[in-house]
Amino acid sequence: MKKLQAIAYMTIGAVAAFAVTSTTQVIAKSGTVSTQLTYRNIGVVIDGVPTTLTDLEGRTQEPFIAFDTVYVPLSAMARALGKTSQWEQSTATIYIGSSGQTASNTKEVPLYNMPYLEIGDGSGYDVMQAGTDNYIRISSDTGSVSNGRKTCSNYAVYPIDMMATKFTAILNPPYDNKANPELVYKIYGDGQLLFTSPIFTPITAPQPISLNVSGFSKLKIETTLTYTNTYVSYSWGVGNGQWKGIQNAVFVVPN
């Protein structure tokens, strides 16, 4: 009988090296194989931070064991590492990150100096530069109250006219003003949900993202904040820069 060799928590470093060993040889082939999948609440830790893998709708995607090997949902893992993933049906190829377009024939267009097409609440839109960094804050103080928590949302829509191939940014957590804030980012391409962030709290580390936006004409960025309603109005900290919002956001477009 083969001895299963795996670890309950997969520690993934900057180069995404999977700390899993197996005595089973894997051979690429066409066809269908039936097997039993084993779920053992396998955890994932990225650069020391426990991470829950989710699909685009925010549903948990668990790693599983088959053929004495731990398998990880690729699309969910790529998003957790700030990468995009793409399946090319014609060649049966999975692309992680760039699909092969070289830096020499592309350029980066910063989002902070792009005009938006539409915005939910103009008073909650703020742009700031600090040194080599730039920030876009999309916030709102208007919302609904349920079970003692207030939820506020705002969004901005940008024109990309099917020219951009990639969108990259750093998503920052809310700052702590003792209102137990929870912040979620969502990004849409022409109405299609492309990305849902995990729930950010004040202790969440900033998350880099890289999304494939090829073929879309509009990109929508949405923020939703929930906080304890004992505060009449949650201060996003826009004025004093305590909430950094969306940092160094750029579109990659052809030269």
Image: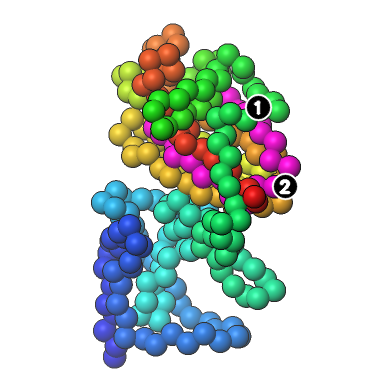
Q: Which residue, as the protein is rendered here, is positioned at the far top?
A: 232
77 to the left or right of 90:
left
**Depth order, front residue of 72/220:** 220
**Depth order, front residue of 93/63:** 93
Q: Which residue is labeled 1 in the image?
A: 115
User: What is the quadrant of residue 239 in the picture?
Assistant: top left
Q: Which residue is labeled 2 in the image?
A: 162
- Above or below residue 69? Residue 147 is above
The type of residue carrying mark 2 is Met
Q: Position of residue 153 (x, y in %)?
A: 56, 25
Residue sitting at 56 percent across and 44 percent down?
108
- Above or below residue 250? Residue 243 is above
The type of residue carrying mark 1 is Pro
Q: Secondary structure at mark 1?
A: loop
- Above or below residue 2? Residue 106 is above
Q: Earlier in the sequence, mark 1 or mark 2?
A: 1
Mark 1 Cα shell of 10 Å, populated few (<14), some (14-19), many (≥20): few
Circles 1 and 2 in contact, beta carbons < 8 Å: no
User: What is the quadrant of residue 155 in the picture?
Assistant: top right
Residue sitting at 48 percent across and 63 percent down?
74
Q: Which residues are magenta?
A: 154-173
Q: Is residue 159 magenta?
A: yes
Q: Which mark is residue 128?
A: none
173 to the left or right of 86:
left
